[in-house]
Image: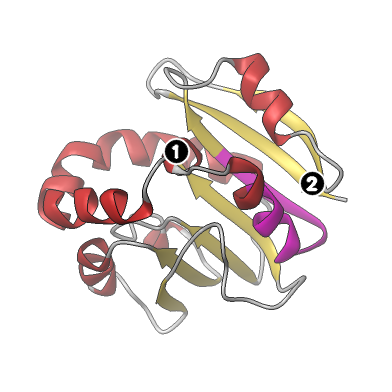
């Protein structure tokens, strides 16, 4: 079982500058693939937003949620008048049901102790027929494992794919 406090501490200690230095290039490659699958919504949840690298690429209202206060401080620098930040837990989202037209979560699921809780929360806050995109590290999950994990009563997988320049499986689902 993964301890949330240790995950939070790890990312807080890593620091936003080192996080951006280490992950920006690959995150942007993932975002390019994700944006090609995403119709521009009015309201999107970036669940596990890190330093907010996705924000400037979106032309919609975005709520960025992350457990790390250190990464959120950096994300604050990337905010526009259409972006908002919340420090919170991906397994206990602080939102009402059926609020978001899209939910994107990049490389978060493998850090959580209860992926089913995370998936249930992602579906709960999504409107019916909305798009839920979740990426996961290929070294943690095989394509078959991530497909089985994400397929449930609330999410219907449309596509699972990857690219040479990313280390993730990207799953595109629809909220039933």
Q: Is residue 138 above or below residue 154?
A: above
Q: Residue 1's quadrant in the figure? A: top left
Per the image, the residue denoted by label 2 is 174
For the residues marked 2 and 1, what is the alpha-carbon distance in whole angstroms? 28 Å
Quarter residue 166 falls in:
top left
Does 97 lie within the magenta span? Answer: no
Residue 53 at x, y = what percent? 33, 55
Q: Is residue 60 left or right of residue 98?
A: left
Q: Which residue is mark 1?
A: 1
- Tell me: 72 left or right of 67: left
Instruction: Determine whether 104 is above or below 92 in the image.
Output: above
Mark 2 or 1: in front is 1
Q: Is residue 173 above or below residue 47?
A: above
Q: How is the image coloured?
A: secondary structure
The residue positioned 62% from the left and 56% from the top of the image is 103
Residue range in magenta is 119-134
Decide whether residue 126 is among the magenta residues: yes
């Amino acid at each position: 079982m993964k301890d949330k406090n240790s995950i939070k501490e790890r990312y807080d200690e890593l620091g936003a500058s080192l996080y951006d230095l280490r992950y920006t290039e690959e995150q942007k490659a993932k975002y390019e693939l994700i944006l090609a699958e995403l119709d521009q919504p009015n309201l999107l949840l970036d669940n596990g937003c890190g330093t907010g690298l996705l924000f400037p690429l979106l032309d919609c209202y975005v709520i960025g949620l992350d457990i790390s206060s250190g990464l959120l401080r950096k994300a604050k620098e990337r905010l526009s008048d259409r972006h908002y930040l919340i420090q919170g837990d991906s397994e206990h989202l602080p939102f009402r049901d059926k609020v978001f037209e899209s939910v994107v979560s990049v490389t978060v699921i493998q850090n959580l102790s209860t992926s089913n809780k995370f998936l249930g929360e992602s579906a709960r806050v999504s409107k019916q027929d909305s798009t839920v995109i979740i990426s996961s590290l290929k070294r943690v999950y095989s394509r078959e494992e991530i497909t089985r994990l994400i397929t449930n009563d609330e999410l219907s997988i449309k596509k699972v794919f990857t690219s040479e320049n990313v280390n993730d499986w990207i799953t595109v689902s629809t909220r039933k």
